[in-house]
């Protein structure tokens, strides 16, 4: 008898950006780290079917956990596959001028956006 169970997965694509190009982002599902996605990388993670919450947190040693995304709720059925894109909510000019610090502070340090692909 064949085992035809399909895996339940989420795919995370992190856009390549100059800002934070040296550091990875920790991928959390329901508050538990399931892996890391680097700059410009796509990673696939196995999850259990059901309702979950996805969040990314930058793994900078001195700002670990401060720079993050807002939690994103999603539902996935058994054997399902969802895709998410993540990026910073500010651009290169904000990075060069230091304006990103104001953006980070006034957004509660939630500077990563997550969107369903």
Image (cartoon, rainbow, N blue to C red):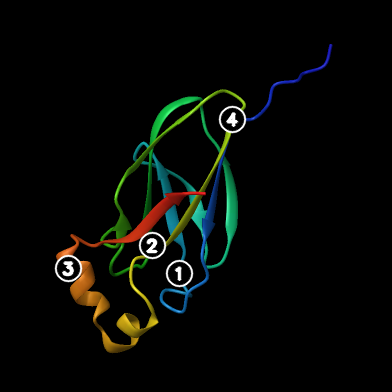
- Of tags 4 and 2, the one toward the viewer is 4
Residue name at image x 15 percent, y 66 percent = 106
Q: Which residue is mark 2?
A: 59
Above or below, 52 relative to 17 = above
Contact flag, marks 4 and 2 (Cβ < 8 Å):
no
Going from N to C along the chain, the mark reached first, 4 or 3, is 4
- Of tags 4 and 3, the one toward the viewer is 4
Instruction: Tell me residue 75's x, y (percent).
Output: 44, 30
Instruction: Tell me residue 60's x, y (percent).
Output: 36, 67
Instruction: Tell me residue 14's x, y (percent).
Output: 51, 61
Going from N to C along the chain, the mark reached first, 3 or 1, is 1
Residue name at image x 75 percent, y 20 percent = 4
Name the disc covering residue 23, or none.
Answer: 1
Above or below, 4 relative to 103 = above
Q: Which residue is mark 4?
A: 80
Q: Secondary structure at mark 4?
A: loop
- Of tags 4 and 1, the one toward the viewer is 4
């Amino acid at each position: 008898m064949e085992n035809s169970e399909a895996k339940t997965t989420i795919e995370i694509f992190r856009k390549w950006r100059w800002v934070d190009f040296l550091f990875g982002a920790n991928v959390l599902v329901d508050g538990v780290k399931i892996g890391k996605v680097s700059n410009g990388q796509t990673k696939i993670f196995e999850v259990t079917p059901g309702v979950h919450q996805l969040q990314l947190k930058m793994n900078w040693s001195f700002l670990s956990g401060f720079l993050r995304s807002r939690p994103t709720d999603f539902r996935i059925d058994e054997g399902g596959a969802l895709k998410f894109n993540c990026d910073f909510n500010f651009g290169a000019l904000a990075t060069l001028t230091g304006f990103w610090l104001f953006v980070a502070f006034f957004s509660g340090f939630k500077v990563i956006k997550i969107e369903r692909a």
